[in-house]
Amino acid sequence: MGCHPSTQPTAAEVAEELAPWVETFVPEMVLVNYYPPGSGMGMHVDEFEESRAPVISVSIGDEALFRMGHTESRTQPWDDVTLCSGDLVVFGGPKRFAYHGVVRVNDATLPDGCGLEQGRINITIRQVSAAPNVQGC
């Protein structure tokens, strides 16, 4: 499947799409998950959060097959994307509250020098409050 799609948006296209929320995004929570080779995380929705701000996700280590579905249920249709070490994913808009998960982490696919012997670390950065209080940061 490979790490990167044959057609990727340009930096200008990404900047234009993200511009509306960049100035108001307040990171309130960082979640770090470790996935051993062969593991995954079932399809779920992050419904405990009030914010509709996008989620930022960074992958380190082994490749993972990431699945993004729709908002109604865990069933198809869905899109599968292989995430590689160093990949950044931002999901928001209609996909912000869509079912998503990690189908599996592929063993022995991590690049040299990433700091891991095996597995995958995923770091997500989130704004969880609808209107966060930024005073006193």
Image (spheres, rainbow, N blue to C red):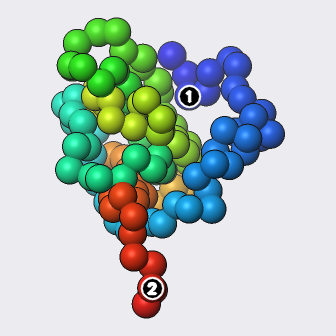
Please state if 88 lies on the left or on the right of 70 as rendered.
right
Q: Amino acid at mark 2?
A: Gln
Q: Residue 89, position in %: x, y?
A: 52, 41
Residue 112's label in the rendered image is none
Q: Is residue 1 visible?
A: yes
Q: Residue 69, position in %: x, y?
A: 34, 21
Q: Amino acid at mark 1?
A: Cys
Residue lying farthest to the front in this orientation: 131
Residue shown at 43% from the left, 90% from the top: 136
Residue shown at 36% from the left, 15% from the top: 78
Please state if 96 lies on the left or on the right of 15 as rendered.
left
Looking at the picture, tell me which residue is in the foreground, 69 or 21. 21
Q: CA distance from mark 1 to mark 2?
A: 40 Å
Give the labeled residue for mark 1.
3
Residue 135's label in the rendered image is 2
Mark 1 or 2, closer to the camera: 2
The 10 Å Cα crowd at callout 1, few under 14, some 14 to 19, many 20 or more, is some
Q: Residue 49, position in %: x, y?
A: 27, 52
Quarter of the rendering occupied by the C terminus: bottom left
> Which badge, 1 or 2, comes first in the chain's sequence?
1
